[in-house]
Image (cartoon, helix red, strand yellow):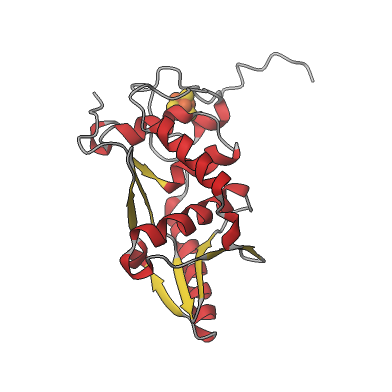
Amino acid sequence: MAVWRQDGPYIWVTWLTKLLVGENSCEWSAWFKACHEGWSWKKQPSTFDTVSWQMDHSSQVALSRKAWEKQGYVIFTEDQNSFVLRGRSAKLAGKPDLIVKKGNDAIVVDVKTGRPLPSHSVQVMLYMYAIPRSLGQHKGVEFSGRVVYQDHEIEIPASAVDGEFVSNVSELILRLASENPARRVPSARECRYCNVTLQDCPERVEDDTTGEGVTSDF
Ligand code: SF4
């Protein structure tokens, strides 16, 4: 049985991004993970090819890193970029691929291998907000952001992290850190990629791969 987190809710940036832009709707999944100890609940096995994704991603990050180095930027990478931002209701954690700095220019960079999605930019905006508030060596620095795809990049100005953005993020975090469960929205599309099992989420929609559910002639 899932056990409540002793140190209070703990939220990964990546659990927020799709909810913030409406790519996902089931807040219950993030609420459950935020409020329960990770070791205490069973995970749905991943259908995603993690190894090839990781190799692809690492080689893209290495290419991006080289390009920034060539331009004379100082690079921070891997665990240098791990942060935990402590708020009143929850902790927010994350790790961007690269932080690059040259003079007054400070940029959070995240590399993506799949098709572009709005949640990728929101992920970088969350890093831009959290890093100057949680990592000592970047304290108070104003960051812009960059999402790097194989064939193009998206630049995010520092001004994108405005009051409205912070208020939307805070409201979502409050819902996910609440003792009252967040909204559950079961759907085949979302449940398919969710690692919460039927044991904890009885409303989980299982994939119908048999074709038995087909009732139309067209
Ligand atoms: S299995 Fe489906 S309904 Fe249950 S938490 Fe995950 S996405 Fe939500």
In this picture, residue 187 sits left or right of residue 170: right
Q: Residue at x 43, y 27 (%)?
A: 28
**Number of callouts:** 0
**In the displayed structure, would residue 23 be above or below residue 156?**
above
Residue toward you, 140 or 199: 140
Relative placement, left or right, of 211 versus 19 is: right
Q: 129 or 207: which is nearer to us?
A: 129
- Report whether residue 66 is seen: yes
Q: Furthest residue to the right?
A: 218
Is there any visible trace of residue 52 in the rendered image? no
Q: Which residue corresponds to the image point at 74% horizontal and 15% vertical from the top-left?
A: 216
* Quadrant that contains the C terminus: top right
147 lies above or below 20:
below
Q: Depth check: 77 or 86 in front?
A: 86
Instruction: Give the residue drawn at x 41%, y 33%.
Output: 174
- Locate residue 132: give its quadrant: bottom left
